[in-house]
Amino acid sequence: MTQNISEPTTGEYEAINFDGLEHGDKAQCYPLRQHIIASERRNLPATLTIEQWCTTVNYFRGKCAYCQVRDFEVLEHFIPHRHGGGTTADNCVPACRICNGLKSSHLPSDIPRSSRYRQIRWSILRVQEYLTTCGSEATAAS
Ligand SMILES: [Zn+2]
């Protein structure tokens, strides 16, 4: 395998074909390991388990946590790696590639004001609420 894991915010390196999979199965076979390795390389926390990830994906019904319309395609770090966010239950949500690309390495508090970011800005509080409640419970339960 020669996958590039140096830029985890691009969402471009997960080359798994999810077509036809239910979101539960999609979460189950998601290449979580890539994110764990990328976080460990940066000395960031990397404790997210596949069970915690499935719980989060199911919570968002297999949809993108930001637009809530498109199916999830990638794991999104709420606090980006470059700002110290790890691969943990309280920092990871499912996202579509479009929202993942838009949010990119922006901090939740630093989403641009322009209209193309409107949907993400609207979703930030809801996502944050989930991560501070369900996300941290998942962490505590592990
Ligand atoms: Zn989306």
Image: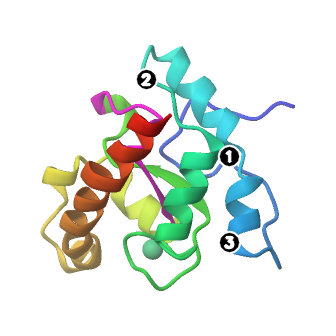
What residue appears at the point 48 percent right and 35 percent down from the top-left corner? Answer: 87
Tell me the distance, in whole angstroms, between the alpha carbons under discs 2 and 1. Answer: 21 Å
Q: Which residue is mark 2?
A: 45
Examine the structure image and report whether residue 88 is included in the region drawn in magenta: yes
Give the quarter of the image for residue 21.
Answer: bottom right
Label located before the other in sequence (2 or 3): 3
- Residue 8 shown left or right of residue 93 in the figure: right
Label located before the other in sequence (1 or 3): 1
Is ligand 1 closer than 8 angstroms to the Cβ of mark 2?
Answer: no
Up-down: is 112 above or below 50?
A: below
Q: Secondary structure at mark 1?
A: loop
135, 7: nearer the viewer = 135
Label located before the other in sequence (2 or 1): 1
- For label 3, the crowd category at 10 Å Cα-Cα, with few meaning under 14, some 14 to 19 and many 20 or more, is many
- Residue 11 shown left or right of residue 92 in the figure: right
Magenta highlight range: 83-95
Give the quarter of the image for residue 91.
Answer: top left
- Residue 6 shown left or right of residue 119 in the figure: right
Q: Which residue is mark 1?
A: 13
Up-down: is 76 above or below 60?
A: above
Q: Which residue is mark 3?
A: 23
Does any portion of residue 18 appear in the rendered image? yes
- For label 2, the crowd category at 10 Å Cα-Cα, with few meaning under 14, some 14 to 19 and many 20 or more, is some
Residue type at tag 2: Pro
- For label 1, the crowd category at 10 Å Cα-Cα, with few meaning under 14, some 14 to 19 and many 20 or more, is some
Residue type at tag 1: Tyr
What residue appears at the point 24 percent right and 57 percent down from the top-left corner? Answer: 128
What residue appears at the point 31 percent right and 42 percent down from the top-left corner? Answer: 79
What residue appears at the point 67 percent right and 34 percent down from the top-left corner? Answer: 34
96, 12: nearer the viewer = 96
Horizontal and vertical percent for residue 139? 42, 37
Considering the whole magenta stretch, tell me its main secondary structure.
loop
